Image (spheres, grey):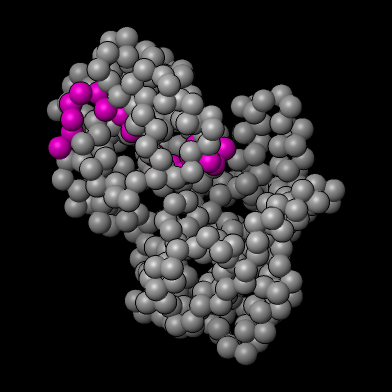
Amino acid sequence: MKIAFLTARFPYPLDRGDRLTSYELIRELSRRHAVTLFSLIDGSEPREGYAELSRLTSAIHVVRLSRWRSWLQAWLGLLSRVPSQVAYYRSSAMRRLVEREVDISRFDVVFVQLFRMAPYVREVRHPAKILFMADSIGLNLRRAEQFCPWWRRPGVRWEAWRAARFEVRSAREFREAWVVSPRDRDDLRGRGCPNVVVAAHGVNQRLFDVRRAPAGTGRLMFLGNLSVPHNVDAACHAARDIFPYIRERKPGAELLLVGASPSLAVRRLSALPGVRVTGAVPDLGEFWSTSDALIAPLRFSSGIQNKVLEAMAAGLPVLTTPQVAEALDALNGGLLRAESDPKGLAMAALELLDHPAAAAAMAERARDFARLNYSWSRLGEQLERVAPESR
């Protein structure tokens, strides 16, 4: 099968959730199919990324879009009904390239990752166009608004209104639109997208081989790209609102904030007692092995949080919020601890730290759950079913 795979960001380095998803899915699909990658680039992509993706794909087509131009387009986009995050990735060169190559190459499936790339196939007539939305951006932004500073709320509200309508329009132009949780599906269907279905999701299978050797000192880890709004908010919430309760009982406890591109607000957290901002690290192996728990107090998000799923696969006890657990279908079965308020999360963390055997048993149940339910091969199989139906 020949697959055209469109993504806004080059799938390397694996420093963001969308890049990680693109990379893992391309790697899975390339086992049995010919994948042609179409991606925008901004010039910051590492050379080894091209070598890695060339190994997995039959062809790579890239169009350079400088960051200054992207930001200019996003700001100018504020004056239109097109979401700024879509205007940011606007490129007439990419549109022409995609239209030409799809016409010439006779792909069996056209797979578009995220709704910001949907305009590039708007004029493409193909029976097997799939839009991988992952989550509902409109839902995410609605949740985010209440946690923003007052001066940002009008802008977030304007982007949410535009994104919600653009999502519906985009989804209707595809054979199917895929999201990764029932909550996101229900939100989009309720807004007029009957062709939205829940897609399978996967996790790095190598994490199941992590051998745990927890520090036992109260080492908590938060993981994620530390420039993304929901991660910045969660990191600040963990350090300022939750961790002090834990330090009262365990003065030697640590909070490690791990991830690429920490914002100024996150970097400032390193001044707090017991908080360490590591930034990007080349290998997470030590953190997966020695941390006592992952704390992911995300107050607004949608879809599946890769960080939580990866922690479950690595056998790390997880503390998170109910909406994150719900997206993973992990609220029941004693797989993780989910609390909505800071003190509740702190008390749950202390309970896990005080009872390491029970924490390890919970983490092992979560590991088995992730192994049974989350595999990139399932998403690949779901895509494979679409092409025969279109012929």
Q: Quadrant of residue 124?
A: bottom right
Q: Quadrant of residue 259?
A: top left
Left or right side of 347 for 304: right
Magenta residue span: 213-231
Image location (x, y in percent) of residue 14: 42, 56
Left or right side of 302 for 116: right
Is residue 339 something that shows in the picture? Answer: no
In front of the other: 306 or 377: 306
Q: Tell me the quadrant of the picture where the C terminus can be found.
A: bottom right
* Residue under the image location 46 percent in, 78 percent down: 35
Of all residues, the one furthest to the bottom in this rendering is 104
> As displayed, is residue 32 above or below residue 288?
below
Is 217 a magenta residue? Answer: yes
Is residue 235 something that shows in the picture? Answer: yes
Image location (x, y in percent) of residue 367: 25, 45
> As displayed, is residue 388 above or below residue 44?
below
* Residue under the image location 39 percent in, 73 percent down: 51
